[in-house]
Structures are given as structure tokens and as C-alpha cells.
Image (tube, grey):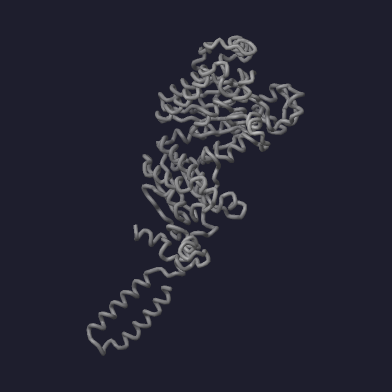
């Protein structure tokens, strides 16, 4: 859409510049306005660029949480389970050593093939996953371990069981807990930062985003399904909802 | 055991991996109930009492457990002088006092837990190792008191307590006093946490009843041995109550990992290195 707009503007500019000398200042003011508009459009990312970053954010070859763990932390010890109902594979939690200091790490984990993705539920956590995250945060808080969270999820899992197990409350309580933690916290969006599933572990002192990562109120497909009542009109609503690293930092 | 205990807390050490026919027949303690291999004492000890054929984890006595986990010669027992009173004058098939005396003669222990100061891979900490052969590892006032004191002492220097549980649950013969050991040990762990200390809870076969429902489930990290039964109510009780067929792995460490109750299932040979790693991580905190 923005490319069409750019072409249209260029067209009008070209026509206007042709008659520039015939009329007075009023026209040149109009010309300036159009040029500024064109300038803004050029700076602005195009639809294709934005969709490209959505695809890049979802790329299977991106490092996932455990890839970072392997490269950043020594002495990794993974914690499993919410001590209640289940061990949610979509969220990984554990302790490791970063530059000689023990830190706690919580992150979404996607799979690279079907089997892995079934175990990881495509990085979409159940309430049990957030409860695993919160009990890890509490442990870190008790022992003064700084907390790192890695955000990479299409969103919370829209399933029957997830609702029955109290999805909304689990996400809310995780945020409430993160606000109260006495330890330093850093969240990094390393891929997809989708909706409540992302914010549940992203309420940190410092929130960082990688290039070509996205952070949005909902996935583009989810947005389409709400606004257009069908997930198939995917590409249209992406502009208002998706925040790439660049746009997110400019809007704070 | 009287009917009360079989209805409330299952203290059986029946093993799900075990072949039921062998379980009744060949009862020799050095015969693997899973594959039938037989070992000399020294062979089993050399393999940390894990069957080299099939990986079955034989029960480990508390002193042996400490020997397996601790740096040689570092164990210094504390509160070893504590002995249980018999305020209820309890009598089931024989007097409680007689049972206690027999257990002490049979095991060489004052009660079902051994506590003290220890070092693991150079890291000083407290250990609390339970012994199933002392009255089914049941938790009475002495077990509760020794564990609580270990936590208190660890809390003084913001340290770590490593607990290794193997217990049928609360000790029936001490009645309500046994039940009160649950909140006592829970409070001890809470105070340990408040001091900045940590509890690493190792669940050995079996960890059931009151021990599961108190300190053993409150570890900052919870490890379980492979195949260990770790449930509140044992499989027989649950099956009899619900009249449902239970899954084969009901209550076992592996299923508890799936259901989110334990952090890791750790084979016995990995236990010492894993505890050493945790001590390293928790020691390099703030």
C-alpha cells in the first residue's frame, strides 16, 4: 500500500513541478508539503519490508532460547515443571553462570521440526509455563540471581485447557511478580514477541529487541481473526499492530 | 501394620519396575528385583548400589548415601543424641519403645534420619539423609527435629541443606506429634529461605506421605532418582480408593517430571556432580 502511495505522490510531484513557474508561492508551499510527505514515506518501511521482518522474526534458522543458553551461559542447570500440573516445554527456565555470576534465565522455546514443535507447542505456553517462569523468578529473587528473559512466542496458547487452567490470571500474576522483583531484570525479544504470552515474561528493568524481531499486541493472523473474523486476510492489518525493533524504539 | 496405616499412608516399598513374581519369591536384598541379577556387597557398593545390568536403583542406607555424596571424611554428625519419647505409650503388634530399640540395634541409627555438616566437592553444606530401613523411614519427632535443626544451623551461615528423603510418611506410632512434624519442617525451610539459604531436595525411593507433603517438596531444586516412587498417597491406596486402574508409571519420578513436580531425574552416578554444580551456582549469586 505504501508503495502505491509513494508512486502516487511522485506522480503528483512530477506534474506539479512542471507547472511550478506558472503560479506563485501557494503552489510551492503545496510542493514543499508533498516533498516532505514523500520524504517521510521513503523513511517509512514498506509493507514488504515489514512483512519481511515478520518472516525473519519467525525464521527457523534464528537462534532460539536454548541456542543462546548454550553460547552465553556456563554450568546450565535446567529447572522443570510448575510444581503443580505439568512441565511446559514452551518455556525453558534454569540457572547458569554468566561472567562468573549465577543468573536465572527464562525464555520461550520453539522447535525446529514437527516433533520438537509438538513438545514445545510452537513456543506457545500454557498457564503452567508462566507458573514455571514465576517460580523460577521467585527462586532468583530469594537468592539474588539477576533475571534474564528471552521472548520468542507467537503468543499465549489459545486452547480450551489453557483457558480452563487459568491462562489470563497466570499471565497477569507473572507481570505483577516481575514488577515487584528486587533483582535486576533484563528482557530481550529474540524473535516473536506476541501478545500476552510475551508480556508475561517481559516486564523487566531493561527491555531490548533484536533487529528483525517483532513485538506486538497480537500476531498478524490473530489480529485478522479478530478484526476480519478470519485468519486468512493475514497481510492486511499488520501495519497497525506489528512493531519492529525500529518502530518500537521510536514509540518508546 | 494396623489397618489405620494401610488406609492413610502407604509405607510399602513395592517397586513398579519389579517383576511381581520375583518380588515375593527371591527376596535377597542383593538380588535385583528388576532383572534378577545377584551381586556381592562390594560389587553393589562399587556401582553405588545401581544394578549394572538394568540400572535398577537399590535402596541406599543413610550412612552409605552420605559416603556416596560427601567428600571423604568431611561428615560431622549433629544432633545424633536425640531419641524419641513414647508419650502415647503406643502399642500396635508390639510396643513402640520395643520397635525403636529393635530399629536402633538393626540399623545402628538413633532414628530414620542422619544429619550433619559435610562438604560436597569442596562446598560446605548441611546434609539430611533419611534411612528407609529404620521403621520405613517414617517421620516422627526426632526426624522432624533433626531436619529442623539442620535448617536452623544452615540458616545461621545462609548455607545450603541437601536432603535425601526415603520415607513411608509420618510415623503412626507418634500420632498427632508425627503430624506436627509437617508444619515444623515446613517452617524450618521457610526460615532457611528467609536467611538466604537454600534446600536441595533429593527424592529417593520411596518418598511418600508426610515427607512429600512437607519439606521434600519445598526444595529450591528438587531432584529424584530414576524409578523412585514419589507421591503423597501410594499407588495401592489410590487404586483402592478410586477403584481405577492406575497408569504403569503412577507416582514414579519420571511421571512426576512430566507433571511438573520435580526439576530433574538424576541417575545415582550423576547425583554428586549435579549437587556440586548446584552448590557452585547458588554460591556464585549476589
Of all residues shown, which one is farthest toward the left? A25
Where does the image place residue A165, in percent across and percent down from the top left?
Answer: 51, 45
Q: Quadrant of residue A2?
A: bottom left
- Please name the residue shown 45% across and 46% down the image: A169
Q: What is the quadrant of the N terminus of chain B in the image?
A: top right
Q: Quadrant of residue A211?
A: bottom left
- Please name the residue shown 52% across and 37% down the image: A83
Front in this rendered view, residue B154 or B250: B250
Of all residues shown, which one is farthest toward the bottom? A22
- Image side of residue B166 versus residue B184, left or right: right
Where does the image place residue B50, in percent across and percent down from the top left?
Answer: 67, 29
- Image side of residue B266 versus residue B189, left or right: right
- Image side of residue A183 versus residue B12, left or right: left
Where does the image place residue A60, in percent across and percent down from the top left?
Answer: 55, 58
Q: What is the quadrant of the C terminus of chain B in the image?
A: top left
- Please name the residue shown 60% across and 51% down the image: A118
Where does the image place residue B164, in percent across and percent down from the top left?
Answer: 56, 26
- How many numbered markers are drawn? 0
Task: Answer yes or no: is residue B124 visible.
Answer: no
Task: Answer yes or no: is residue B19 visible.
Answer: yes
Relative to A27, say whether B35 is above or below.
above
Relative to B247, say whether B91 is above or below.
above
Amino acid at each position: 500500500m505504501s508503495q502505491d502511495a509513494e508512486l502516487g505522490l511522485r506522480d503528483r510531484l512530477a506534474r506539479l513541478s512542471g507547472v511550478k513557474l506558472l503560479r506563485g508561492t501557494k503552489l510551492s508551499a503545496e510542493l514543499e508539503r508533498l516533498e516532505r510527505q514523500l520524504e517521510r514515506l521513503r523513511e517509512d518501511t514498506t509493507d514488504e519490508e515489514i512483512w519481511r521482518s515478520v518472516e525473519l522474526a519467525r525464521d527457523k534458522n534464528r537462534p532460539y532460547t536454548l541456542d543462546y543458553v548454550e553460547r552465553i551461559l556456563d554450568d546450565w542447570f535446567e529447572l522443570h515443571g510448575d510444581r503443580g500440573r505439568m512441565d511446559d516445554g514452551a518455556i525453558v527456565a534454569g540457572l547458569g553462570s554468566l561472567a562468573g555470576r549465577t543468573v536465572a534465565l527464562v525464555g520461550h522455546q520453539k522447535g525446529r521440526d514437527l516433533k520438537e514443535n509438538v513438545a514445545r507447542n510452537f513456543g506457545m505456553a500454557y498457564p503452567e509455563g508462566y507458573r514455571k517462569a514465576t517460580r523460577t523468578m521467585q527462586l532468583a529473587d530469594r537468592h539474588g540471581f539477576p533475571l534474564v528473559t528471552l521472548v520468542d512466542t507467537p503468543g499465549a496458547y489459545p486452547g480450551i485447557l489453557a483457558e480452563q487452567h487459568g491462562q489470563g490470571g497466570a499471565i497477569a500474576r507473572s507481570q505483577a511478580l516481575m514488577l515487584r522483583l528486587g533483582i535486576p531484570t533484563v528482557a530481550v525479544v529474540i524473535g516473536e514477541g506476541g501478545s500476552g504470552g510475551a508480556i508475561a515474561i517481559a516486564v523487566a528493568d531493561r527491555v531490548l529487541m533484536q533487529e528483525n524481531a517483532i513485538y506486538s499486541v497480537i500476531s498478524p493472523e490473530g489480529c485478522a481473526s479478530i478484526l476480519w473474523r478470519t485468519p486468512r486476510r493475514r497481510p492486511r492489518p499488520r501495519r497497525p499492530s506489528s512493531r519492529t525493533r525500529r518502530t518500537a524504539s521510536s514509540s518508546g | 501394620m494396623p489397618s489405620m496405616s494401610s488406609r492413610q499412608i502407604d509405607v510399602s516399598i513395592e517397586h513398579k519396575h519389579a517383576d511381581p513374581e520375583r518380588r515375593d519369591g527371591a527376596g535377597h536384598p542383593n538380588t535385583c528385583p528388576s532383572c534378577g541379577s545377584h551381586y556381592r556387597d562390594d560389587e553393589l557398593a562399587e556401582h553405588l548400589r545401581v544394578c549394572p545390568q538394568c540400572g535398577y536403583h537399590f535402596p541406599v542406607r543413610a550412612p552409605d548415601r552420605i559416603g556416596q555424596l560427601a567428600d571423604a571424611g568431611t561428615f560431622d554428625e549433629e544432633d545424633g543424641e536425640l531419641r524419641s519419647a513414647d508419650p502415647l505409650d503406643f502399642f500396635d503388634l508390639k510396643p513402640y519403645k520395643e520397635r525403636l530399640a529393635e530399629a536402633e540395634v538393626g540399623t545402628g541409627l538413633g532414628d530414620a534420619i542422619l544429619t550433619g555438616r559435610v562438604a560436597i566437592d569442596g562446598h560446605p553444606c548441611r546434609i539430611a539423609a533419611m534411612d528407609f530401613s529404620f521403621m520405613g523411614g517414617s517421620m516422627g519427632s526426632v526426624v522432624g527435629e533433626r531436619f529442623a535443626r539442620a535448617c536452623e544451623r544452615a540458616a545461621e551461615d545462609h548455607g545450603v541443606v541437601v536432603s535425601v528423603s526415603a520415607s513411608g510418611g509420618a510415623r503412626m506410632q507418634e500420632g498427632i506429634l508425627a503430624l506436627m512434624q509437617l508444619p515444623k519442617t515446613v517452617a524450618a525451610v521457610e526460615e532457611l529461605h528467609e536467611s538466604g539459604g537454600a534446600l536441595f531436595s533429593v527424592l529417593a525411593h520411596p518418598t511418600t506421605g508426610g515427607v512429600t507433603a512437607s519439606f521434600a517438596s519445598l526444595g529450591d531444586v528438587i531432584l529424584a532418582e530414576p524409578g523412585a516412587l514419589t507421591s503423597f498417597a501410594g499407588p495401592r491406596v489410590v487404586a483402592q480408593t478410586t477403584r481405577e486402574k492406575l497408569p504403569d508409571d503412577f507416582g514414579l519420578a519420571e511421571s512426576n517430571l512430566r507433571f511438573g513436580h520435580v526439576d530433574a531425574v538424576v541417575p545415582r552416578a550423576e547425583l554428586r556432580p549435579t549437587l556440586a554444580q548446584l552448590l557452585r551456582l547458588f554460591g556464585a549469586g549476589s
